[in-house]
Image (spheres, rainbow, N blue to C red):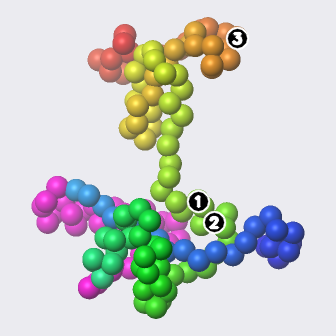
Amino acid sequence: LRQRLGSGQSSVVSYFLNITAFCKDNNETALEVEQDILNSFRKNGFELISPRFNHMRNFLTCLPFMAGKGLFKQLKEAGVVQRAESFNVANLMPLVADNPLTPAGLLAPPYRNQLAFIDIFFRGMNNTNYNMAVCGTSGAGKTG
């Protein structure tokens, strides 16, 4: 760490992690979703704390460009801002997206439920082999 910091490859940054889950308006479902989130983070070494009496502040952190309006200062004063290496903080960011592959073709739902299209003949994919294998259970819609 000291070498990366000294050479300018990395830096120590301040961050605030907020998780907001949306689910059906049902107490049992909300509790189940909350426990799933807590358990998945706990398995990876993160202990999450519920934002008691700070719901508005945490909601505002979900909105873009709110940190510059004095919100980050409030978070620091509340003691919820942490410091870590920039590489680690970048991996906590929720900006995760799949490659859309091609502009048109066979609609293929990727891992994160976003839209992607497959066209093995599209020149932008730089294919030299136009073979393709499709697998799935019976009735899963493999015929496209």
Q: How many marks?
A: 3
Kind of residue at disc 1: Asn
Q: CA distance from mark 1 to mark 2?
A: 5 Å
Marks 2/3: CA distance? 37 Å
| Front residue (pair 90, 46) | 90
Which residue is under mark 3? 128
Q: Are marks 2 and 3 in contact (CB under 8 Å)?
A: no
Looking at the image, do the residues carrying marks 1 and 2 touch, with CB atoms under 8 Å apart?
Answer: yes
Give the residues drawn in magenta, as a range. Answer: 24-53
C-alpha span from label 1 to label 3: 34 Å
**Circle 1 sits on which residue?**
91
Which of disc 3 and disc 1 is earlier in sequence? 1
Q: What amino acid type is highlighted by mark number 2?
A: Asn
Camera-side residue of 57 and 36: 57
Residue at the image position 17 percent from the left and 55 percent from the top: 24
Give the residue type at disc 3.
Thr
Q: Secondary structure at mark 2?
A: helix
Categorize mark 3 by other alpha carbons within 10 Å: few (<14), some (14-19), many (20+). few
Disc 3 is placed on an element classified as loop
The mark found on residue 88 in the picture is 2
Q: Mark 2 Cα within 10 Å, few/some/many (few <14, many 20+)? A: few
| Residue 122 seen in the current view | yes
Horizontal side of 21 relative to 103 (left or right) equals left
Which residue lies at the image location 36% right of the left edge and 21% below the top edge?
Answer: 137
Q: How dense is the environment of label 1, judged by Cα within 10 Å: few (below 14), some, or many (20 and up)?
A: few
Residue 128 position in % (x across, y down)? 70, 11
Query: In x, y percent, where is residue 66?
Result: 41, 70
Which of the two discs, 2 and 3, labels the residue nearer the N terminus?
2
| Residue 136 visible in the shown view | no
Q: Residue at x 27, y 77 (%)?
A: 55
Within the magenta stretch, is there residue 52?
yes
